[in-house]
Amino acid sequence: YMLSIKPIKAFSDNYIWLVSTNEGSIVVDPGEASQILKLIESRDIDLKGILITHHHYDHTNGLEEILKHKKVEVYGPNNNIDFINKRVSEGDEINIIGLKFKVIEVPAHTLDHIAFVHEDESMPFIFCGDTLFSGGCGRVFEGTFEQMFSAIQKIKKLPLNTKIFCGHEYTTSNLEFACAVEPSNKYIEKYLDEVKEKVSLGESSIPSMLETEYKINPFLRCDNEFIKDRINDKFGETNSEIEIFTALRKWKDNF
């Protein structure tokens, strides 16, 4: 059974994901249309559907153009994007191109934010938009820090071998922050060097593996004693994981 997941770069650092099996292709979060239209026109892909994680233009702007050329189902959350014709919410399942996705709601970056989880034991993966990034998490624009913490907890419960397909190439700056949070963590330092090398060659640092994120991503490690102490030294007494998380996110916002 053939499965390929390839990044299509858009804007300065966005990823549109192109997922193909022997039954056709889907794209995730098409912020722009041009490269996808070329693939459709040259018959390199047989587009069967589109998945949308949230309403931001850099994840949805290509919809109108694509749908002019090819009428397909667009699966997405309840929001103001009229081109979504299949509204999905927590617990819904989608079967498309031979793949089964479960929808989870992860509001915070935006209130409508969802993620698509492919639960296959041998090869689990998630399209999480701008909720979890490699080495970081999304900015909290519409929701609350508590909501973002809860969203990350949901993703943390997935199997360790889950591949994380997020919406942006932010890994370098995220890991630079992670190094500031844990200056003595040699693993993060080494991983940052590897990522810089990859990116300089024009390669993608995504997908990452959830197991790797447990080691490098401070937002997944709010229960870590060193990180707790570090936050307490910097911001004064914080106790709960949500407070640690909130302090980390605010620190990152101004980093």
Image: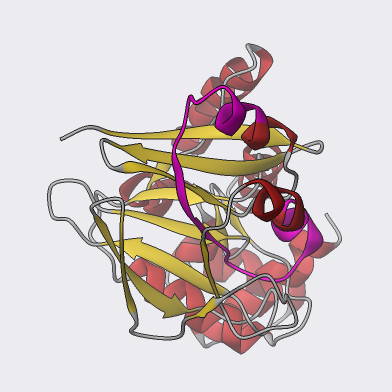
Q: Is residue 53 magenta?
A: yes
Q: Residue at x 81, y 63 (%)?
A: 253
Q: Is residue 80 above or below residue 193?
A: below
Quadrant that contains the C terminus = bottom right
Q: Is residue 64 magenta?
A: no
- Residue 18 is left or right of residue 30, and the answer is left
Q: Residue at x 63, y 61 (%)?
A: 130
Q: Position of residue 183 (x, y in %)?
A: 61, 43
- Residue 101 is left or right of residue 175, and the answer is left
Q: Residue at x 68, y 31 (%)?
A: 35
- Residue 110 is left or right of residue 240, and the answer is right
Q: Nearer the viewer, residue 226 or 110?
A: 110
Quadrant that contains the N terminus = top left
Q: Is residue 201 above or below residue 3?
A: above
Visible residue check, residue 184: no
Q: Position of residue 199 (x, y in %)?
A: 64, 21
Q: Nearer the viewer, residue 239 or 132?
A: 132
Stretch in magenta: 38-62
Q: Position of residue 143 (x, y in %)?
A: 70, 86
- Residue 255 is left or right of residue 53, and the answer is right
Visible residue check, residue 143: yes
